[in-house]
Amino acid sequence: MENAMEIENTVREEEFNSFFSSINFDSGEELSDDDSIYTAYRNHNSKRRIPLPPQEPPQITEQKFVDFEKYVRENCKNKIKILDRRTFHQIEKPIIIAFNHFDEKCYYHTDKLDRLYHLALEYEGQIEFIVADIWDKELFYPHTNPLRFYCRFVAPEDENIKVFAIDQQKRVYEHFDDYDSREILRELCENLLSGKLFKTQAMVEPRNDSLVKICVHSQFKQMVLESSKDILLILGRGDYRPDDEYHLKYEPNYEQIARDFENSNVEIVYMDCDKNFVDFKYNLNCYQTIIFIPHRDKENFMTYARGRDTESLCEFIKLNIQPQSESWRKSELAKCHYKPLTLPKDIDIITRDNLKQYLDENYPQSIRVLERQTFSREKTSSIIYFLNFQKNGIHYYEDTFRKIHYVASTITGFWLYYYIADLQDIDIIYPPWYKQYIDYNDLKQTSMQVYAKDRQNFFYKADDFKTPAQLFYYSFDLNTDWHFHSLPGYICHNSTELLQLCVSQYLKEMIKESQTNIFLTIYSNYTHLNGLNEIAAEVKQTTCDVDLFIMDAKYNSVPLEYRPPPNHTYPVYFFIPKRKKAENTRRYVKVGASKEDILEFIRTQVRMNS
């Protein structure tokens, strides 16, 4: 182990020396011992600081993947179990169930699993402990897109577990505490076993001056679920006070509504949620929450989502008690359900030409069909699926469309856009000069290629994503610039006259603004720079119209068009003329290219662009 560490330290020291020599400070400059390079950059009068060797960009490695099922099986010894939907509703004991990004991000959440395992040992035989991926949270929210539960503001690696407690009566309690330490979860377990989670008021004496019935949790089954009447359930905070000025000003007049429907089969019921448990299925997310529960089907309830005035609420009640109320409710509730993407069964109905119209009409704010005229002006990040429609047709990709729609319908326009395009249009992501390097014959054999564009307008090639969750994680990283990395711009000031350093942050701007020809070398190892100083010196002697730039691919994101072609590695050389850059840029790749090879390439390009 010590020998390995010594070797690693030696390698790091050699890398630093190579990095420092590549910066190539003028020997006459005085260097400060202070390593506060950021202070030096802000203060133009301060002395030059020695730059620290940069950290390598983040890399996804196999060591950071932990198999969720294997970890639970081997480390939790069957004391906690992975959710099985087939048997979940058959469990008779009280249940603690915890959700997180376990399937793909278990590496970051093993501490939560360990915490639950130790609790399971404490409450063995009393409570069933179950864990599940966040995708399975849809178990409690039927007809919902599971990606609704994926946070758009917190990285999946940093999220805490989402915990629910279920008693033997199958009442569901959502635990909201963000600090799920073992002590807090132990308190949750104790309250679950003692019944304290499902609180209820003492029975309230009915008021003679009110037509609104007051309900407490212990009476809920009798007053609501077993009632032969249609129930308008009002879930509020605090005691019901019909004469309160605030409620009269900002809420419907429930007494007037009760009088208006006194001779119908509708009953107005109020419950104080501060003092009474409310069933999880009623989705209490604001006060006051108003729900219509029909007497024929207590599960086919409908939440009121209109204006908070008496007239609008009366109209809502009338719609729910009309002769066609059941079909109306069914239709309205269906609008709130997640609609998976499907294509018409008749293959002639949907073609490549009318695909855009079909998606716009049936799945707005979801997948976009790429249009060449407008795509180049898009500034938003995007993920593009190039599909071989000519080879496979539209319906071959229905599962792919459905997978994209899961994510796109949730975050399109919020973070980025999702496009589908014909594979033959793949040139749109490249500048015009690159088209000569596209192998269209090879594309004909390809089924699909996926590319991503970040906020810096850099394109990246991505693998197809096996699940909607994987596509979501990639989208999150793309939005947070996880894929983009660049050395700080201030190191460019340390360039010599012959070789100038470039960083990805300013690469495109440097190319756009340059008034001279550019010879750009993109490398991944400092040994690739051997001989470049000699080449630069000779170029300067023969022509003053070429600037030589170098960029390290190890520490900088490289745009797609400046990467090595398939089956090649760095270094890669580019000649970018001062005029017609978009059309006349040329790439040069040759294994073991000599000094003369490179010089000849530069001379040829200078002649061709003079």
Image: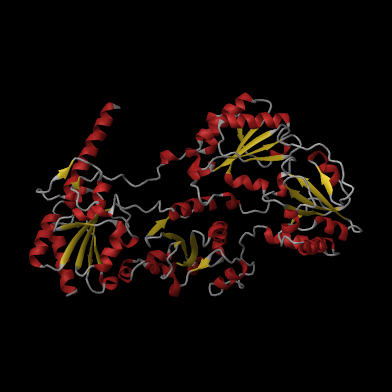
504 or 35: which is nearer to us? 35
Where residue 495 sits, quadrant-wise, is bottom left
Residue 156 x/y as whole percent: 50, 45
Does residue 109 appear left or right of residue 333 in this picture?
A: left
Does residue 436 appear left or right of residue 85 in this picture?
A: left
Q: How is the image coloured?
A: secondary structure
Res. 225 in view: no
Residue at horizontal 83 percent and vertical 65 percent from the top: 324
Does residue 210 appear left or right of residue 376 in this picture?
A: right
Residue at horizontal 54 percent and vertical 49 percent from the top: 151
Residue at horizontal 61 percent and vertical 73 percent from the top: 348
Residue at horizontal 67 percent and vertical 46 percent from the top: 140
Residue 358 x/y as whole percent: 59, 71
464 or 79: which is nearer to us? 79
* 93 over 159 or under it: above or below: above
Does residue 409 appear left or right of residue 143 in this picture?
A: left
The tally of labels here is 0
Residue 135 x/y as whole percent: 59, 47
554 or 508: which is nearer to us? 508
**Quarter that holds the N terminus:** top left
Q: Name the residue at the left extreme.
A: 541
Res. 170 in view: yes
* 607 over 73 or under it: above or below: below
Residue 509 x/y as whole percent: 29, 64
Where residue 378 sits, quadrant-wise, is bottom left
**Quarter that holds the C terminus:** bottom left
310 or 350: which is nearer to us? 310
